[in-house]
Amino acid sequence: DSGVTQTPKHLITATGQRVTLRCSPRSGDLSVYWYQQSLDQGLQFLIQYYNGEERAKGNILERFSAQQFPDLHSELNLSSLELGDSALYFCASSRLSNTGELFFGEGSRLTVL
Amino acid sequence: AQRVTQPEKLLSVFKGAPVELKCNYSYSGSPELFWYVQYSRQRLQLLLRHISRESIKGFTADLNKGETSFHLKKPFAQEEDSAMYYCALSPVKQTGANNLFFGTGTRLTVIP
């Protein structure tokens, strides 16, 4: 499957901990996006990378950080976790930076206890 | 700042009935608008975009700049249309950043 892959699918951790979510974009896609979906919330845009560089930033907390590596995979780091960080985190990718068609992964469900 | 509003969390219609999913937006410039859909146990995927002006799976959406709306319509709903629908806005920027801003979504259920 050459679609967007995210790992892990599920993650349970405790408050105060740090986790890393990983995303591999579709083959050939240079842009990667991270979104957070909390209960009863829409998808909140966190951050976008294009070919290794940060391109746009949304409502990403200072406790969160991300990067895109030379092989174009991306990681989202969440630290000092709080109960409210429990959510579904989606990664998406697109071929160019300025196109509206994003291809989404299945998401990583984070539960903070 | 941009904002996308989908006023209905849930919408149920009978098979064969018309369906309209509402979307309103606020943005100072000229946005690009999209509808994304997530079927049960599938990934979120693009349904249609306003610049294409095409009908996908019988759905159409017209951008009304005067009313800042981009409602999704289908004249005869089918059971396979049951899904979660998200309206999304992309602020057109010369820098090329095309992050999408999503509404909270509407869950459509088509009753047999």
Image (cartoon, coloured by chain):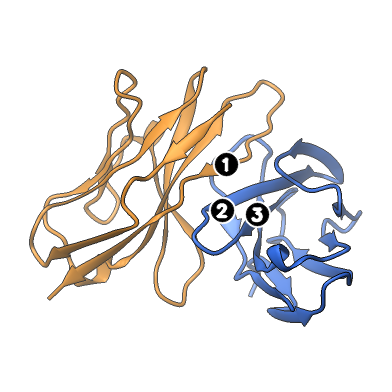
Chain colours: A blue, B orange
| Mark 1: secondary structure | loop
**If the image is split into quadrants, where does the N terminus of chain A sit?**
bottom right
**Residue for badge 1:** B100
Chain of the residue where label 1 is placed in the rendered structure: B
* Location of residue A40 in the rendering, given as x and y in whole percent from the top left corner: 49, 60
Q: Residue at x 88, y 69 (%)?
A: A16
Specify whether disc 1 shares its chain with disc 2.
no
Q: Which of marks 1 and 2 is in front?
A: 2
Amino acid type, residue under disc 2 in the picture: Leu
* Location of residue B75 in the rendering, given as x and y in whole percent from the top left corner: 12, 50
Q: Residue at x 17, y 66 (%)?
A: B78
Amino acid type, residue under disc 3 in the picture: Tyr
Occupied quadrant, residue A49: top right
Please say if the residues under marks 2 and 3 sit with CB atoms less than 8 Å apart: yes
**Residue for badge 3:** A35
**If the image is split into quadrants, where does the C terminus of chain A sit?**
bottom right
Amino acid type, residue under disc 1 in the picture: Leu
How far is disc 3 from disc 1 in space, using C-alphas?
10 Å
| Mark 2: secondary structure | strand
Please say if the residues under marks 1 and 2 sit with CB atoms less than 8 Å apart: yes
Please say if the residues under marks 3 and 1 sit with CB atoms less than 8 Å apart: no
Q: Which of marks 2 and 3 is nearer the N terminus?
A: 3
**Residue for badge 2:** A43
* Location of residue A83 in the rendering, given as x and y in whole percent from the top left corner: 72, 68
| Mark 3: secondary structure | strand
Determine the residue located farthest toward the left in the rendered image: B16
